[in-house]
Structure formats: C-alpha cells, structure tokens
Amino acid sequence: MSIVVIGSSNTDMIIKMPRIPKLGGTILGGKFDTAAGGKGANQAVAAARAGGNVTFVARVGNDMFGQQTIDGFKKDGIDIKNVITDEKESSGVALIFVDEHGENSIAVASGANAELSVEDVKNAQEEIQSAKVVLMQMVG
C-alpha cells in the first residue's frame, strides 16, 4: 500500500535517572541513550515496518543527527526524496528525562521541522495524489 507521511523528525536524547530534577537542580543521571523520534518519523517507520510503501515528507538539519536520521529511513526502506536537508536549521531534538517510575519530562527544539513549508508539501504532490493513505501531523 502506498502511504505518504508528512511530519516531524527528531532525535531523542534520553537520560534515565532516579528522579527528575527540580527547577534549578542538577541530578547525576544513569543511563543515556539516543533514539529516532518525532511523531511523523515514528509513523513513517511503523508504516514501513508493517509493509507499507512509505514516502516521508519532512525536514532535517545538515548535521550528524540529520544524517543518522536519513540513514535510518533508508534502512527501513522509506522513500526519502522528499526529506529535505535544511542548510540553516539544525535537526529537531527532544531532551527526555525519565525517572525510576517511568514518568518523564521532555523539551523539544523543533529545528528544521519548523521550516517545513507548503512548498515542500507541494513538491510531493505526485506522491500524495497517487497514495492510498496520506498521514499528517503537526510539526511545530
């Protein structure tokens, strides 16, 4: 099935810690990990892994996070011709603190996601018109 996903792509930076720091506080965390994230990217990857023929429309930065993201999309068989590398903005990132009970606190820097434009979507018109499913979500 032909699917177009239009949305955000982030790199999640996760620190697991005993508790989330209070305002002005510092805590020595435990395990640090990174993961691919962003609502749009998560949807595109899930659809591709479920067997969909997925085209993703998004923006990433011209940085190591953007390149890692694109490499991941390629690995999952996602069509990336409409994933634009933004030369001015960094890739989106999410900083995630997770406490021992699984509660979290998240801050997102949208970066290139905020630059996804109507023109970017129009450039994917052929793919959108031929898709069986178009999935969109807020990117800002």
Image (tube, rainbow, N blue to C red):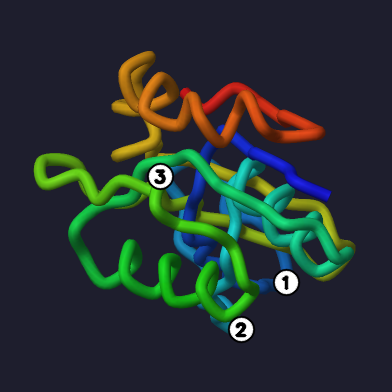
- Three-letter amino acid code of the residue under disc 1: Pro
Q: Are marks 1 and 2 in contact (CB under 8 Å)?
A: yes
Q: Between 72 and 14, which is closer to the camera in this rendering? A: 72
Q: Are marks 1 and 3 in contact (CB under 8 Å)?
A: no
In the displayed structure, would residue 11 be above or below residue 132?
below
Furthest residue in direction bottom, as rendered: 31
Q: Between 35 and 4, which is closer to the camera in this rendering? A: 4
In the displayed structure, would residue 53 be above or below residue 4?
below
Q: From the image, tell me which residue sits under label 1.
A: 18
Q: Secondary structure at mark 1?
A: loop
In the displayed structure, would residue 135 be above or below residue 24?
above
Distance from disc 2 to disc 3, alpha carbons, whole Å, reads: 37 Å
- Three-letter amino acid code of the residue under disc 3: Asn
| Residue at left offset 55%, top offset 46% | 56
Which mark identifies residue 82? 3
Sequence-wise, which precedes: disc 2 or disc 3? 2
In the image, residue 41 lies at what x, y percent? 61, 51
Which mark identifies residue 47? none
| Residue at left offset 52%, top offset 39% | 8
Q: Secondary structure at mark 2?
A: loop
Q: On the image, which quarter does residue 124 sit in?
A: top left
Q: From the image, tell me which residue sits under label 2.
A: 30
